[in-house]
Amino acid sequence: MATLSFPLPRNGFCLRNSSPRRHVFPIPELHSSIRITCSARYGSESKGGLFQFKELKSVACGIFAVWAVTAASPVIAGGQRLPPLSTEADRCEKAFVGNTIGQANGVYDKPIDLRFCDYTNDASNLKGKSLAAALMSDAKFDGADMSEVVMSKAYAVGASFKGVNFSNAVLDRVNFGKANLRGAVFKNAVLSGSTFDEAQLGDAVFEDTIIGYIDLQKICRNITINAEGRAELGCR
């Protein structure tokens, strides 16, 4: 764990400590624990000198505590807490293997982080894969074959799926908020519980799509769906 260190005045602030050590604040790194220590040296100075720092100690400790917690906290997007972006060099390639456990319940041993990855026109590597609860925000899948894929509980906010083939895919409880799904094919796909807030659905195909009544009402409010798509969905 990296640390930030600086000396304090002898009258000090924060927690009183007789040790002559320097003041140390750990700088949290990804996936590391947070430790905040406030200490200073005290000598034979008058009580009046120490009193001057009474308010300063609360402010200083508060500032550093907020800074440290913020640095290590997950990203919060659309009200959903997301872990920090994976630093694994092969994280994008993990979509070609997918999750081997969990599937429809979105349970996994480790999240698949596909954020900002580019799978444009991938014709075979994604087909039929289990990407349950995958993090897909801001990734590009334009023109890819994602037929029979399982994306239960995936987070795909802001991702691009233009012209993607989702035929026979399980896309329940997916967050497609602000995603570009123009020309996507959802033939015989399961869309129950998925949300499409501000998504682009122009020219999308919804033939034989499986979707619940409440979810249907919500998706039918999307004004980007053309007349043919609305007829396939059964929008009134």
Image (cartoon, rainbow, N blue to C red):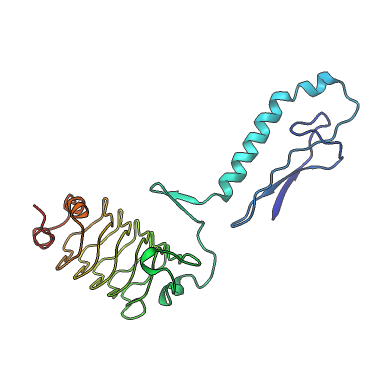
The percent position of residue 203, horizontal first and vertical second, equals 16, 63
Q: Quick one: 173 or 181, which is closer to the camera?
A: 173
Direction from residue 101 to residue 66 in the image, left or right? right
Which residue is depicted at the point 56% across and 45% down?
70
The percent position of residue 172, horizontal first and vertical second, equals 30, 62
Which residue is depicted at the point 73% across and 42% down?
37
The percent position of residue 111, horizontal first and vertical second, equals 47, 64
Q: Quick one: 50 or 128, which is closer to the camera?
A: 128
Q: Quick one: 226 or 196, which is closer to the camera?
A: 196
The percent position of residue 193, horizontal first and vertical second, equals 28, 57
Which residue is depicted at the point 34% across and 64% down?
152
The quarter of the rendered structure image containing the N terminus is: bottom right
Which residue is depicted at the point 33% across and 72% down?
120
User: Which residue is farthest bottom?
Assistant: 124
Q: Is residue 66 above or below residue 230?
A: above
Q: Quadrant of residue 177?
A: bottom left
